[in-house]
Amino acid sequence: MSVPSFRLDDRVALVTGAGSGIGRRIATGLAEMGADVACLDLPGSDLTGTVQSIKDVGRRGVAVPADVTREDELAEAVDRTERELGPLRLAVNAAGIANAAPAEEMPADQWSRVIDVNLTGVFLSCQAEGRALLRNGGGSIVNIASMSGTIANRGLTQAHYNASKAGVMHLTKSLATEWCDRKVRVNSVSPGYTATPMNRRAEVAERVKGFEADTPLGRMATVDEMVGPVVFLLSDAASFVTGTDLLVDGGFVCW
Ligand code: NAP
């Protein structure tokens, strides 16, 4: 038996949240592993840097702007991906937002917006991508959840965010079981604290030293460190892995 491949050669992928942080690095990482990549972020966001970095490693890249809370925009993004790059096989859903407020004071619309983007947005993304994957005979989806779906972060008042990420993990399991007999695998990756613009928000920036001290590996992750786990789950090396959540947290939840 040959060793299964971690390569993604000539497969077409779509990455949401590809304009910044983890999604941007993953989009380039998939290209480095041989995929052609459609880059989705909010309309008006600058995706030229991500697309250029894909082209720089010799793969095809295209910008497909969309809001992940909009079904029509997601459908058009998937259509455009397939028109320009070919049948979709892989997807990574990294678009997300974060903010904070004490639970007893949080306005309902602040709660709803985070749930809309982080949970409903991942469902609608999976739905649009899943329709294509099912039509194309199979594929693999990775949703970016968070260790905040497993633990409630000490000192951060983000009940909405934590609940949205726990939701993403169980949504992932639910889709994995619905699509398991049609060759579509669905998994999640849960980062710990990672150096991105999300952790330069005022309410978390001054706490970074504490995040690092609370992490057994003693530091935040770099975005580079999210690529390998995602590539593994997308690749044939993970052909018997579906419905799982892979914590990439430097050991945070062990303490
Ligand atoms: P980021 O740098 O802020 O990137 C998130 C991207 O998603 C941004 O480009 C953002 O656009 C985009 N986005 C927001 N709302 C969207 C929408 N409705 N439709 C399409 N795109 C939208 O954050 P990140 O740190 O890379 O986070 C990526 C994912 O990892 C998120 O799901 C986050 O929850 C998760 N995560 C991050 C960490 C961490 O420590 N950084 C830890 C665990 C999990 P705008 O910039 O215009 O809003």
Image (spheres, rainbow, N blue to C red):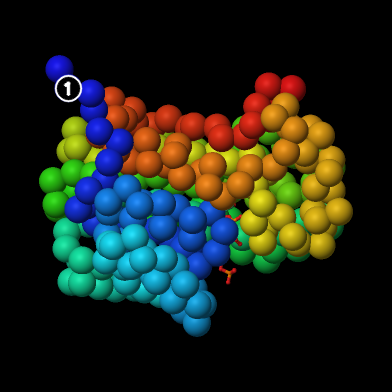
Tell me which amino acid carries mark 1: Ser
Q: Residues within 10 Å of mark 1 (few under 14, many from 20)?
A: few
Q: Is residue 174 rendered to the left or right of residue 21?
A: left
Q: Which is nearer the eye, 230 or 127?
A: 230
**Can residue 11 be seen in the rendering of this structure?**
yes
Can you say which quadrant of the picture contains the N terminus?
Answer: top left
Q: Which is nearer the eye, 74 or 45?
A: 45
Percent of width and height locating residue 148: 65, 40
Locate residue 124: give its quadrant: bottom left
| Residue at x-position 29% and y-position 30% | 237
Percent of width and height locating residue 245: 48, 32
Q: Which residue is mark 1?
A: 2
Locate residue 85: give its quadrant: bottom left
| Residue at x-position 77% and y-position 38% | 212
**Can residue 176 be seen in the rendering of this structure?**
no
Q: Give the structural element (helix, strand or loop) at label 1.
A: loop
Can you say which quadrant of the picture contains the C terminus?
Answer: top right
